[in-house]
Image (cartoon, rainbow, N blue to C red):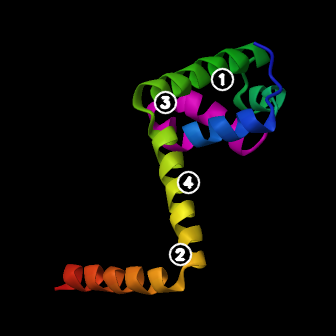
Amino acid sequence: MSWGMSIEDMLHYGALFDFYGALLTDAQHDIVYEYITLNETLSEIAENKHITKQAVSDALGKALKKLDFYEDTLHLVAKFQNILAQVDKVALDLLDDEDLARRIGAKYKDLIKSLED
């Protein structure tokens, strides 16, 4: 596998790693963390771990396939991103309508108060 991910790929796998990273083996987790989060090269990871660059490449490839599989199966990242988009839309609607913002704020306060009782 040839490495040199685009920014979009790095963001995609970063999100998948945030959600599913704990499901990887310890070795895979470390390699993905170093590659995606720390932005280390395969050579740097190989040197740090005293393994070959090919071993790092293989482990990274398998780990990324696992992350894709988890998302294809569970869709947690897609659901989370959908919720964020809806929250953004509500926030924009509230900015456009002060009366609506006040009404929702009052309901929110009532909900919080009911949780405290």
Is residue 91 magenta-colored? no
Q: Quadrant of residue 117?
A: bottom left
Report which residue position mark 1 lands on. 60
Q: Position of residue 58 (x, y in %)?
A: 67, 14
Separation (CA) of disc 4 from disc 1: 30 Å
Nearer the observer, disc 4 or disc 1? 4
Looking at the image, residue 29 sits to the left or right of residue 61; the answer is left
- Figure check: 63 above or below 36: above
Disc 1 residue crowd, few under 14, some 14–19, many 20+, Cα 10 Å:
many
Q: What residue type is disc 4 on?
A: Ala
Disc 2 residue crowd, few under 14, some 14–19, many 20+, Cα 10 Å:
some
Q: Main secondary structure of the magenta part?
A: helix
What are the residue bounds of the magenta stretch?
A: 17-40
Report which residue position mark 4 lands on. 85
Question: Is residue 107 among the parts visible in the rendering?
Answer: yes
Dot 1 falls on a residue whose secondary structure is helix
Quadrant the N terminus occupies? top right
Nearer the observer, disc 2 or disc 4? 2
* Proximity of marks 2 and 4: CB atoms separated by less than 8 Å: no
- Figure check: 65 above or below 34: above
